[in-house]
Image: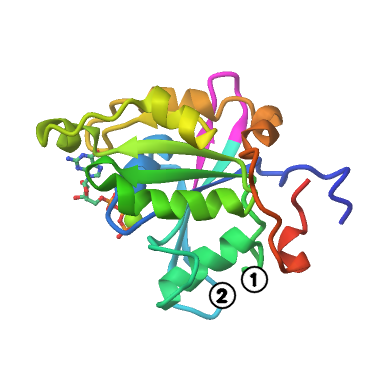
Amino acid sequence: MNEAVVHFHPGGPLVALVGNPNCGKTALYNLLTGSRQKVANYAGVTVERKEGRLTTSSGKNLRVLDLPGTYSLYPRSPDERVTCDVLFGRAQGEKRPDLAVCVVDATNLRRNLRLVLAVRRLGLPCVVALNMADLARKQGIVIDPAALSRELGVPVVSTVGIRADGVDDLRRSLEDPAAWKKLVPAEALAVPDAAHTQGVS
Ligand SMILES: Nc1nc2c(ncn2[C@@H]2O[C@H](COP(=O)(O)OP(=O)(O)OP(=O)(O)O)[C@@H](O)[C@H]2O)c(=O)[nH]1
Ligand SMILES: [Mg+2]
C-alpha cells in the first residue's frame, strides 16, 4: 500500500486511547463513542479489542480504539503486549494509530507521564487527557494544563471521565485529522527498528 496516497483507513483515522491501568481510558472511550462500538479479541490472544466510532462536529468519522492499560512500552503481560504492538504498528491486522490520546491520572502525574514521554518518543501524534481532574482537585493537587502542554509540546485537556467534564474539549482537539501531523512532539526520536516507522509520514 502506498502510504503517500492512502492516508487513512476507509472507516476514518484511528485514534488510540493509551494510558496506565485504571486511569479512565474506558470511561473516556465510552463518552467519546457512546454505544457505537465493536468488541472482539485480538488475533491469537484473549485480550479484548474495543473499537468505537466518533463523529466530529464537522462530520468527520474517527475510529477510536480503547487499548489495554500499560505502565511502559516494555510489556509484562499479554494485555500490555497488545498495547505495545499496536503502538509500534506491529499488531496483526491492526493499523498503526494515527493519533494517541494519552490518558493520565492527574492524581499520579509523575508515574503516568512516563508513558506519555515514551509514546512521544515513538513519534506518534498525541493529545493528553488529564483525567481524574475531580480527584486531583479534592486532593489539593493543582495542575496547570496550559503549562503542562507547553512542557510536553502537545495539547493537554483536563477531563473527568465519570462526569463528561472536558470531553467536549477533548473531542474538539480531535477535530482536524489533517492537522495531527503537527502534534508530533518536536523532539520525538526515531524508533531504532526501521520496521516500526512504517506508515509514519
Ligand atoms: N473520580 C473519577 N473517577 C473516574 C474518572 N475516570 C474514570 N473513573 C473511574 O475510575 C475507574 C477506572 O476507570 P476505567 O475507565 O475503567 O479505567 P481504564 O483506564 O479503562 O482501566 P484499564 O482498562 O483497567 O486499564 C472506574 O471506576 C471509573 O468509573 C474520573 O475522571 N474521576
Ligand atoms: Mg479500560
Label disc, if present, on residue 92 of the rendered structure: 1
Q: Are marks 2 and 1 in contact (CB under 8 Å)?
A: yes
Q: Earlier in the sequence, mark 2 or mark 1?
A: 2
Q: 98 or 184: which is nearer to us? A: 184
Disc 2 residue: CB within 8 Å of ligand 1 = no
CA distance separating discs 2 and 1: 7 Å
Q: Residue at x 56, y 75 (%)?
A: 43
| CA neighbours of label 1 inside 10 A, class few (<14), some (14 to 19), many (20+) | few
Q: Inspect the image, locate mark 1, and give the three-letter code of the amino acid beneath it.
A: Gln
Label disc, if present, on residue 43 of the rendered structure: 2
Q: Residue at x 76, y 54 (%)?
A: 199
Residue 73 covered by magenta stretch: no
Left or right of 168 on screen, residue 119 = right
Left or right of 45 on screen, residue 134 = left
Left or right of 180 on screen, residue 109 = left
Q: Is residue 25 above or below residue 75?
A: above
Q: Is residue 26 visible?
A: no
